[in-house]
Amino acid sequence: MPYVTATIKVNELQAEGNARLIVEFAGDAGEPLRSRPFQVSGTSTMPQFREWVFAQLADLNTSRTVAIAAGLQVGQAVTPLAPTAPPALTAEQIWLEKARRLQRATALGLTVAQAVTDVAALRADVNATYLTAYVGKV
């Protein structure tokens, strides 16, 4: 019982010259009608519009499938889940960032004693952690 048809219900010209379509999606078994907007510009093509319609039908049908899942029913208790932490940087990513910092710092041409010391320390760190595979990534 999926959404299967799309019908243009509104085609309105907007002030900036583009058109805005409102497309209504219907199912084959009494699913509620759903409307979604599509912006038509001077570069829009009919194949792009038809691909958008296909994607909207897929989204509506996937959403409908998810919405009827047991865990999403009225009265169902929801256990909160903290967002996952981003993955730790790899040794290569860390080295590349240090090498890029070294490039930027060196390009500044700083002559203050502390800056020269800091750049030298960064250069020593980049050299100490260098691997042959890294050089092609800079």
Image (spheres, helix red, strand yellow):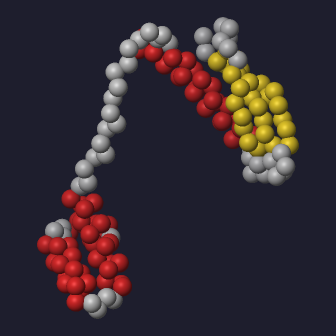
Quarter of the image with the N terminus is top right
Would residue 6 be visible to someone looking at this image?
no
Quarter of the image with the C terminus is bottom left
Q: Position of residue 91 (x, y in %)?
A: 21, 59
Residue extending farthest to the left is: 128
- Which residue is depicted at the point 28% across and 77% down? 102
Q: Position of residue 37 (x, y in %)?
A: 72, 34
Of 80 and 29, which appears nearest the observer? 80
Q: Position of residue 96 (x, y in %)?
A: 28, 66
When asked about the image quadrant of residue 12, the answer is: top right
- Which residue is depicted at the point 32% across and 72% down? 100
Residue extending farthest to the bottom is: 111
Q: Is residue 105 above or below residue 28?
A: below
Would residue 89 be visible to someone looking at this image?
yes
When asked about the image quadrant of residue 61, the answer is: top right
- Which residue is depicted at the point 35% across and 26% down? 80
In-image side of 114 versus 59 (left or right): left
Of 97 and 135, which appears nearest the observer? 97
Q: Position of residue 75 (x, y in %)?
A: 44, 9
Q: How many marks?
A: 0
When asked about the image quadrant of residue 84, the answer is: top left
Of 81 and 124, which appears nearest the observer? 81
